Amino acid sequence: MCGIIGYIGERRACEVIVKGLKRLEYRGYDSVGVVTEENGKLYIKKGVGSVDEVVERLNLLDMPGNRGVGHTRWATHGVPNDINAHPQKDCTGKIALVHNGIIENFAELKKELVEKGHTFESDTDTEVIAHLIEEELKSSGNFEEALRKALLKLKGSFALGIVYTGEPDRLYFVRNESPLVLGIGDGEMFAASDVPAFLEYTNKVVFLDDMEYAVVTKDSWVVKRLETGEEVEKEVKTIDWTLEMAEKAGFPHFMLKEIFEQPRVLRDAIHGNAKVIRDVAREIANYSKIFIVAMGTSYHAALTGKYLLQRLAKKVPIVEDASEFRYEFEDLIDENSLVIAITQSGETADTLAAMKLAKRKGAKVLAIVNVVGSMATRIADLTLYTHAGPEIGVAATKTYTTQLAVLTMLAIELARTLGTAEEEHLKELEEGLRRVPDLVEGILNLSEPLRELAEELKDKQNFFYIGRGIDLPTALEGALKLKEISYIHAEGLSAGELKHGPLALIEDGVPVVAIAPNGRTFDKMLGNIEEAKARGAHVIALGSSERLEEVSDTFIRMPDLDEILTPIPYIVPLQLLAYHLAVLRGNDPDKPRNLAKSVTVE
Ligand code: F6R
């Protein structure tokens, strides 16, 4: 996730852009860049660091011109460095652009462009877009047409702000699966990833939809379809948010905003790994001694990964919390071992220590990480990114579901490489996974009913979360979310374990959250629910079967899908329930007590 902002009008563009970048910094903070234009010349300044650091070091407020675009980066392709910072430009230096999103087919496009003689400076996927427009411009001569033709060749997600010296009175903005909104001023126009970037100047906005682009001058704007170039009628909306509300896109907390971002970041995770996953699967396919290490929420993703690898790739990995791994497995790791480390931050001390140990012993190390360039990516031999963008809320939400998406893709691809599952089933799973972001979108509509449920449950002292098989880790993660932000005691356990002791704690009104999708263990789950009910539990069941609805006190209807794909959608209501309980109990879910976003001590 990155932040983009553009301005055209009478003011000094650099001032408006720098202010906007400051407000967008939560979207990315590894590098910053601005391009302005005056008298047919582009002025570009960019570099690694926070907005304040780069503004001061490169004097960003000293750039001429009344039009330009800016970018705050959260690296996806190419490590954070000065060259990879945006804007990126074409060979002629006449086209400069900033980008938020991921271009899936950039490697193929780059190869073709290099063969045609284009010279690339950076490792980014973004630079391909500038060269592609340049190439199309050679044959069409009309910039807008060249832009359309070029962008129709892209696969993936992109929000773009584009400056072209050949057309001195305008800017172009494009949106596909990454957010972009126009700000309509009086004799000036704005565009940004998010409203707060320009809210100081105007509250009149036009939201672009996927595959739309805008041509903006200081006095006019028009939105068109990318496929056809036809004009689209758009409504100008008036925003009545305060600046603080706007930074959270109207949500009261970052955590809720991040829960709601999941459909989009899941799409990014799928796009972002579509091509690389095959190579990674091939590189690790022959390892039979596999360890998965992680902490906290990432550990729950690791546990889900174990079920995925077992079921699809017929591998039996050992999953250990990284703090235990070092002391228990040192003698067992060798050059025939594969260690998969899962970490959002890439900086968790225990996970890094486990990775270093694995390297020392000659093991192959694959990291699944959110923060590009973090320590974990430097230790690992191979890295898969989750592409969730910065997570500001301390409790992990969107980074968890994107970890699950990457693990699902990896298990599918491993199964394909090894021939351990029917190709037809793997294809169905891939198609199903591509539909999961839409399903999650639907589940987000449960937020209000879940808030009402939280009202009912907010004074409870203990919660139990039960699940089986691939959804046991969902129960553990649901319980962790509740503990860490609502401070209610919660236990996640396998439903089968319930009658081996914990049932003693189930009495009248104790909430038992049962994760019960249709699948191998559904009938057994029904039995466990009955056991809990017989002791007076308030059973909150997540599933899609009518039988489940009949036995539960509160039924949370979920989409019916292959059991393998259930961990992603099923955690979403549990994130929402924990969030609403935390808020109703007067806690700030963004800053839970005694927990840091990145735990850098062992
Ligand atoms: C829970 C949470 C923590 C982290 C854990 C690992 O919501 O945020 O449990 O999951 O500290 O962090 P990473 O994934 O950065 O290694």
Image (cartoon, rainbow, N blue to C red):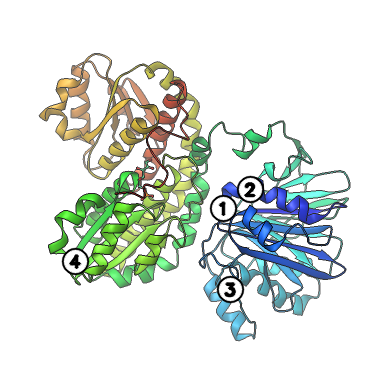
- Crowd class of label 1 (few under 14; some 14 to 19; many from 20; radius 10 Å): many
**Disc 3 and disc 2: Cα gap in Å?**
23 Å
Q: Nearer the viewer, mark 4 or mark 2?
A: 2
- Which residue lies under the disc numbered 2? 24
- Crowd class of label 2 (few under 14; some 14 to 19; many from 20; radius 10 Å): many
Which numbered marker is on residue 130? none
Going from N to C along the chain, the mark reached first, 1 or 4, is 1
**Residue at image coords 63%, 33%:** 245
Between 528 and 374, the residue placed more toward the observer is: 374
Going from N to C along the chain, the mark reached first, 3 or 1, is 1
- Crowd class of label 3 (few under 14; some 14 to 19; many from 20; radius 10 Å): many
- Which residue lies under the disc numbered 3? 122
**Disc 1 and disc 4: Cα gap in Å?**
38 Å
Q: Is mark 1 on a helix, strand or loop?
A: loop
**Left or right: 51 in relation to 492:** right
Residue 20 image offset from top left, x and y in percent? 70, 48
The amino acid marked with disc number 2 is Leu
Q: Is mark 3 on a helix, strand or loop?
A: loop
- Asked if residue 193 can be seen in this view, the reply is no
